[in-house]
Amino acid sequence: MTEAFEITGLPSEGGVLIVADHASNHVPQDVDLGIPPQYLEDHIAYDPGTAAIARLMTENSGYLAILGTVSRLVVDLNRYPDEDSLIPKRSDGVEIPGNDISATERQARLDRHFTPYHDRVRELVSDLKPALVLSLHSFTPTLRTNPQLERPWDIGILYNQYAIASRFALQFLDAEGLLNVGDQLPYSGKELNATMNRQCEAIGQPYFGVELRQDLIMEPAGQRRFADILLRICDKIRTALA
């Protein structure tokens, strides 16, 4: 583990690479976000459940994962370097006064966390030539800023223009009939897909994005359930792509 990322699993050329941008809610001791500590357990700080699911999946041969090891409130790894939301000043109704920082401080956070993470993702894709990349995220079923909004899906599949693996994922999940599956829900991969756009879409690397409903993966049983589902789907996609 480094300050910017953790790698779990054994490298395998032609395997599956799992990329979990928001796996951690860690805030370095020298960073003061200026928010009550309970918000570090909230969805605004990280994607609960994703780190555990990635680690479970990498117990299987041919699966390797890279996990971001800093909270998305410090720097959001699934953004472009020039986006304002890279270091958010507000998230789901919560003000983050510690992120009102200078351009020099902003660059320091990129150099410390963002750039090393993305450099390593790029190296893994280049060196391992994975058959498939899985972008692993989770979503909250409710938002403070829009409590009336319904998010009933168990799992969402996200993609941009290069959608071949995502189409297979939707097909295989529908065939299993076990989950309420969202196509480009609760977000659209055409809008929120920065890491995959840069690391996969731009070079024709097969990938698909997953959003898992957080209240289904907070406990070990749910994490094991979804790890098994994703392992089945990934293996089926790999076969279909071959």
Image: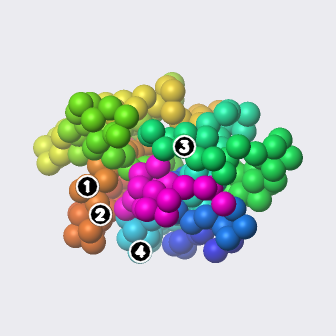
- Residue type highlighted by circle 3: Glu
Q: CA distance from mark 1 to mark 3?
A: 24 Å
For label 1, the residue is 215
1 and 3 marks in contact (CB < 8 Å): no
> Residue 240 at x, y = what percent?
36, 43
> Callout 4: helix, strand or loop?
loop
Image quadrant where one finds the C terminus: top left
Which badge, 1 or 4, is on the more N-terminal residue? 4
For label 2, the residue is 218
Q: Which residues are magenta?
A: 32-50
Report whether 187 appears left or right of 221: right
- Residue type highlighted by circle 4: Glu
- Residue type highlighted by circle 2: Met
Residue furthest to the right in view is 104
Q: CA distance from mark 4 to mark 2?
A: 19 Å
For label 3, the residue is 95
4 and 3 marks in contact (CB < 8 Å): no
Find out whether residue 38 is within the magenta segment: yes
2 and 1 marks in contact (CB < 8 Å): yes
Q: Residue at x 51, y 72 (%)?
A: 9
> Callout 3: helix, strand or loop?
strand
Instruction: Sort mark 4 into few (<14), some (14-19) or many (20+) by Cα contacts within 10 Å.
Output: few
Colour mapping? rainbow
